[in-house]
Image: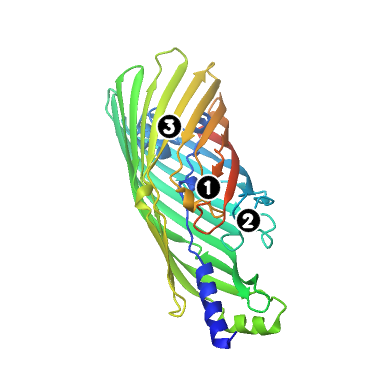
Amino acid sequence: MRPSTLRFLTIALLTLSIAPLGFAAGFSIFEQGAKATGMGGAFTATADDPSAIFYNVAGIAYQRETTAMLGGTLISFRNEFKGDRYEFPGPDTTEGYEDHLFTPPNAYLLIPVGENATFGIGQFTPFGLRTHWENQDAFTGRFISQDANLKVFSVQPSFAWKTSSGKFAIGAGAEWRASKVSLERNLPAINPFTLQVADIGHVVLQSDEVNDAWGWNVGVILRPSETWSVGVNYRAPITIDYKGDATFTQILTGNPQFDAIVATQLPPEQAIKTAIDYPDQLHIGIATTAIPTWTLELDAVRTGWSDFETLVVDFENPSTPDLVNNEQWEDAWSYRLGANKRVNDMWQVQLGVVYDESPQPVWNVGPLLPDSDRVGLSFGVELTHGKWTLSLADLYLPFVDRDTLGQNEDGFNGVYETTANLMSFDLGYKF
């Protein structure tokens, strides 16, 4: 093989192997309060604790005491990939995630203003992602993704007002959203001396520490009678522009001639830019207390992922081609049914069930994010003692097995089996 031909082949393989960051609806997180989590996220019309800042900001108007609440959710994943019988990487392949906990926090403060209004400020984590594969240097999908990490942090000052009769409330908030993202993977090329695929580099795409943008949300609650309430909350889409760096590190193959060629063609460290379009969300809920000591709620939540069509990574160096990835997500719905039982003045118990649709097309399901429909069951308890309230909840979330059906865009086919467990906790205090 002539050196010029080998040089061209190496450049082409390097370029094709560097795909951009891509995410789907599977990284949306609705567990922003333990009581709401215990009710399966069906909280839009109830919205009776400080986490209403997230679920339906209008709900804070009904809360007439200065209240602080602090907590979080421990999220653990179990994922197993089994290779397709007839496609790469083959039926003998079984791989999974590294063990790790993802712990999004939440914090809220409410301050009543006058007789009918409330000011609040909340911190929550509406999105997040971590897919870190075991034995990443031997992982068969290492040229697609070894470790992807998306961190999101939101702060929302809010204000809500209700009528004196309490039949109607409206609220709004301004959301400041900050984020950091990273992706690691290996780079392949065909060794012309062995005609085998070799690992010739490792790339890290890393954003700056803080990339941010502003958004807003608005909510209303209508209480036509003492036992019925209807809630609607809308959270606007937010686009965050990311700046960061791409670092390319050579992996030696042991062949001096081939390694020398790779060393001359590996892209230099350089600045990158990209943007992620976070979707809008519409929450609609109806709740009733017609059964004494019980609150029952049914919610439907639409997430507007159809706006997430393409993702572009812009490399600063003109010799490194920019990358364009077609996403083509679809809008997705989540349906939630929750119940809260007031046992006595101290104890409450929650139950819930949730069904989430995945918007991710089958051809895009892969190591970066193997999303799927899922059905979850939740349980929670809440203890109130004096001015203190402790809430605990657990959501068990098994995903429907997702088969790529031989259609994966990267030629990496098989079945993904995923299970998540989410344990939420909150401690509240009324001043």
In which image quadrant can residue 137 be found? bottom right
State the residue lying farthest toward the top: 292
Residue 405 circle label: 1
Estimate the x, y position of residue 285 in percent, counting from the top left. 37, 29
Question: Label 1 near label 3: C-beta < 8 Å?
Answer: no
Q: Check disc 2 and give the amino acid type.
A: Pro
Please name the residue shown 53% across and 78% down the image: 11
Residue 102 placement (x, y as % from top left): 59, 47
Q: Are marks 3 and 2 in contact (CB under 8 Å)?
A: no
* Frontmost residue, 78 versus 157: 78
Toward the viewer: 114 or 397?
397
Which mark, residue 89? 2
Q: Earlier in the sequence, mark 3 or mark 2?
A: 2
Q: Position of residue 398 (x, y in %)?
A: 57, 36
Give how far across and how far down residue 126 sits, in percent. Answer: 46, 46
| Amino acid carrying mark 3 in the image | Tyr
Please tell me which residue is depicted at 38% across the width and 59% down the height of the picture.
Answer: 310
Q: Nearer the viewer, mark 3 or mark 1?
A: 1
Q: Give the alpha-carbon distance from disc 3 to disc 1, as whole Å.
A: 27 Å
Q: Which residue is mark 3?
A: 335
Q: Which mark is residue 198?
A: none
Q: Earlier in the sequence, mark 3 or mark 1?
A: 3
Under mark 1, the amino acid is Leu
* Residue furthest to the right: 254
Is residue 100 found left or right of 109 in the rendered image?
Answer: right
